[in-house]
Image (cartoon, rainbow, N blue to C red):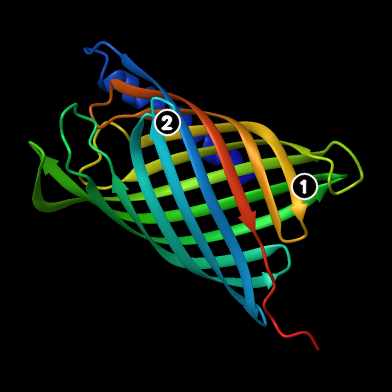
Amino acid sequence: MKNICRLLAAVICIIQFADDVTAQQTKTINHQSQSWFSINSTIKVKGRLGFLADVHIRRNNFLADPSFYFVRGAINYWHTPNLTFAVGYGHMWVAPSTQGYKRFSNENRIYQQVQYTSKIGSVNVSQRLRNEQRWQEIIVQDKSTHTNKFTDRVRYQLSFSIPLGKDIHVPAFTIADEIDLQFGKEVVYNTFDQNRVFVGLKQTITPTLSFDIGYMYVMQQKPSGYQYDENDTFRWFFYYTPDWRKKK
């Protein structure tokens, strides 16, 4: 709890600093509607070892235009049934934001993750701390410069799943918030990268397959410090969690 309070205090200080630095500019907000679909797999393979694998598609103007395509994989280790550690790699293809441009930007990531799950009564609680090293391709005038922008991003997510009934096929109410902070010599005005709030329902289909569906609000600060993207997002994520270990 102390660490969470410290993180929130740091976020408040960073936002205040950004407001002071960019006070001479007029804050501008770009409103967008989006849709976001993904399949997220957590696979147990042998003993305490397993894999994570994600595939993501996000669209702008609800479904009309591409935003990004993203694939990610990792080795996952169960220290206990409630505490896991992961190390992995991801690649993202980011669509151009300038009208008329066609060149997608490539982004490579290496990431480390720790996740802890617990219960408060019947409520399932999940905390995830992720650190990402990102190399983002720089595009100028719809052409690659063959150079990258490097940032180190720290992400903390807290989520709650509240069952609406005792049967596993009755959906659960889900609420989550994730704060993203980034660091690096090229990060000047937007150490606060973005905040994501999700509200929706989680539905179990089978013991190894479920999904959540709902609304996500994303506020992202741009490199200028005074420009923001405000995204109203329809989110539909599937979760596949098989156990491939040999049964004794």
Q: Mark 1 packing: few (<14 Cα in 10 Å), some, or many (20+)?
A: some
Q: CA distance from mark 1 to mark 2?
A: 32 Å
Whether tag 1 and tag 2 are in contact, CB under 8 A, the answer is: no
Relative to the observer, which residue lies in front, 140 or 118?
Answer: 140
Q: Nearer the viewer, residue 34 or 11?
A: 34
Residue 245 position in % (x across, y down)? 69, 81
Q: Which residue is mark 1?
A: 124
Picture coordinates of residue 76 (x, y %)?
Answer: 56, 70
Residue at image coords 77%, 47%: 124
Asked where in the image residue 131 lies, by quadrant, the reply is bottom left
Q: Residue reaching furthest right?
A: 166
Q: Amino acid at mark 2?
A: Leu
Asked if one can make out residue 159 in the rendered structure from this viewpoint, the answer is: yes
Q: Nearer the viewer, mark 1 or mark 2?
A: 2
Vertical side of 233 occupied by 106: above or below? below
Above or below, 153 against 90 in this view is above
Residue drawn at x 48%, y 67% as measured from the top left: 74
